[in-house]
Amino acid sequence: MTIMTGIILVLFASLVLSVWLAFATAPRGISVLALLLAITVCIAIAAVAYLYTPTAVALTFHGIRIERPIGSVEFPYAVVRSVQSSDAWLGISFKRPPGGNSGFFGIWGAFTSQTLGNHTLYGTKARGAVAISTTDGTIVVTPDERSRFTRDLLDRAAARNEP
């Protein structure tokens, strides 16, 4: 994600520079307005991407918690049906409405792919995924310690789902 974030930040800087150069001969008020608009749009996109980006995935007493700057998302263990762990690249995924973010600070949102179908992804990297099939669909997370996370999740979900 660091490479993608760096690339996007360079693109933002290029956009602002292009606007500045494009409006260099325009009246000062118009060039300042265009530059402020470009900077505002870049900052707004960066802020939304950052605020919704997962920072950690944790197993709590109640369920799976995805930590984000704007607030955590939690899924109770009772909705977990199966867990599949993979170190492979997930392949090409396409955003689906309402969309999400494909690498600017992290990966999050609604996606579809050939391998996983429709899924919601909360990741900080493109490898080391855990696909969690739930009663409401598929959730994909990229925890730091994938093997331990998978083992602990399976244990906790089994304990919660026992009659």
Image (cartoon, rainbow, N blue to C red):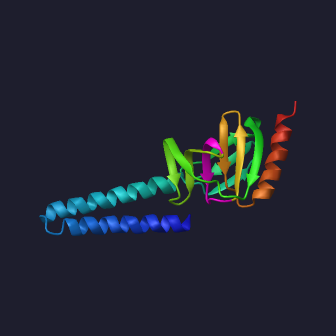
Residue at screen point 19% across, 63% down: 31
Assign the N terminus to one quadrant of the image.
Answer: bottom right
- Horizontal arrangement in the rendering, residue 34 relative to residue 1 (left or right): left
Query: What residue is drawn where x is 83% and y is 52%?
Result: 151
- Residue 111: within the magenta? no
In the displayed structure, would residue 9 be above or below residue 50? below
Q: Nearer the viewer, residue 52 or 114?
A: 114
Query: Residue 117: in sight, yes or no?
Result: yes
Residue at point 28%, 57% (across, down): 37
Residue at the (21%, 59%) spot, across then down: 33
Q: Is 120 colored magenta in this rendering?
A: yes
Q: Position of residue 143 (x, y in %)?
A: 70, 57
In-front residue for pair 152/85: 85
Question: Which quarter of the rendered picture does the C terminus lie within?
Answer: top right
> In the image, is 153 to the left or to the right of 22?
right
Residue 139, relative to residue 88: is it above or below? above
Q: With 32 as the anchor, is 142 left or right in this view?
A: right
Relative image position of residue 108 (x, y in whole percent): 56, 50
Residue range (magenta): 116-127
- Residue 61 location, x and y as percent? 77, 45
- Residue sitting at the far front: 114
Residue sitting at the far right: 163
The part of the image, by quadrant, that contains residue 26 is: bottom left
State the image coordinates of residue 118 (x, y, percent, origin top left). 60, 40
